[in-house]
Image: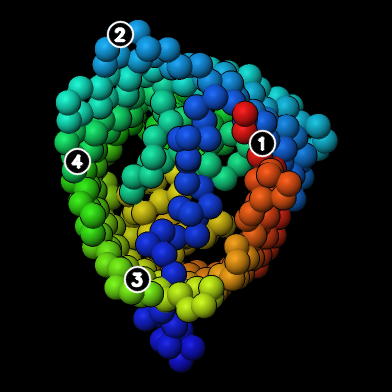
Amino acid sequence: MRLLLILIPLLLLAQSLRERQGRYVLAQHLRGEVRFGYIDTEENGFGVAGHLHYHHSLSKGIDLGITLEGARALWGESGQFFGDGEKGVVFVSELFALVQGEGFSLKLGRIAIPWTPHADSDDIRLVPNYFRGLYGEIGRNFRLLYLDRMAGWGSGGSIGTFKKFSQILDLPGSFDAIWALGLVEEEWQLWYYLFGGYGQSLYGSWEKEQGPWRFGVQFDMGGGAFDNKSFGGYGAVEFEGVQLYGAMSWELGSNLAPSFGGGPLYTSMELWSLDGIERPKRGEVVGVEIGGFGLMVGHFHGRGYTRELDWYWSGKILGVEVELLQAQSPGSNLFRCTIRYGF
């Protein structure tokens, strides 16, 4: 604990490890990409995936886009890569209209979305998450989100099928849609979510960079069926290419609002976050990163307790993007390697 208290003021980046590893980079998805991936967990698998994207300007301010996505097992089976009981899948992952004018843009249809606190495309497997709905940017600061279906690796079942959120969460009744409104400034953001008829959540964060130092605080307050009262903080420092970081999260409720992606908390890791612990109370994460190689340790407390150790490396070899990650916790061990080539 003494080491933790020393490192907490040092922490690395505003994003959690999960958010940084899973960030969906739009520029990489504008044309085409081939991926090879290997995952070693309870179900091992090696496969190939990729997409082809076509973008057409219909008229001034109106563009159309379509993406064909596919994944195929070359060896083994892994529901996290290919979907439950599937050897491969091909589907239309994006089919949208992009409407742009002075000071606004709206994307409607089957879409990929950037990080938002409770929903994002979370690109850490062969196939990212995709949604059906609307994502809008109004002026510099306002964000509008409406989602009613989800596909991709995080949706479970057949990853090529767009499913209702009630089906994904196995909830009774109708979890028909997610509505969200965000106000995003350079150093702070505020988001309000409505989760169908089940409940709502208010998320806020404030982050500051001062020389080599970065630090921030966040909260996430639920309502209705969700009584989460989450608070967290992080800090980071970089010195001569070495980044030291850490974060803490506290939970004063018991039933956390759902996240369809990497999640909002600074302490989210590859395998665990506080929302995976029964009656969660506290999470702590510390780590170091040097030249693309990182080591992270996390502890998560609640009615149960678990810990996680992750190491990761990302970089380019002969112009090809390579990402390696291993995550270990009691009873779980995951290793994944992803190779990406865009064209």
> What count of labels does the image hold?
4
Q: Which residue is mark 1?
A: 341
Q: Which residue is mark 4?
A: 140
Q: Amino acid at mark 1?
A: Tyr
**Can the viewer see residue 139?**
yes
Is residue 156 depicted above or below 160 in this figure? Answer: below
Query: What percent of the width, then of the height, locates residue 205?
Result: 25, 59
Structural crowding at the residue carrying mark 3, measured as other residues with C-alpha within 10 Å and reported as few (<14), some (14–19) or many (≥20): many
The secondary element bearing badge 4 is classed as loop
Q: CA distance from mark 1 to mark 4?
A: 32 Å
Q: Which residue is mark 3?
A: 214
Q: CA distance from mark 1 to mark 3?
A: 32 Å
The secondary element bearing badge 1 is classed as strand
Does label 1 or label 2 sit earlier along the sequence? Answer: 2
The secondary element bearing badge 2 is classed as strand
Residue at left offset 18%, top offset 43%: 141
Q: Amino acid at mark 3?
A: Arg
The secondary element bearing badge 3 is classed as strand
Apparent side of residue 154 relative to residue 309 in the rendered image (left or right):
left
Is residue 229 depicted above or below 244 in this figure? Answer: above
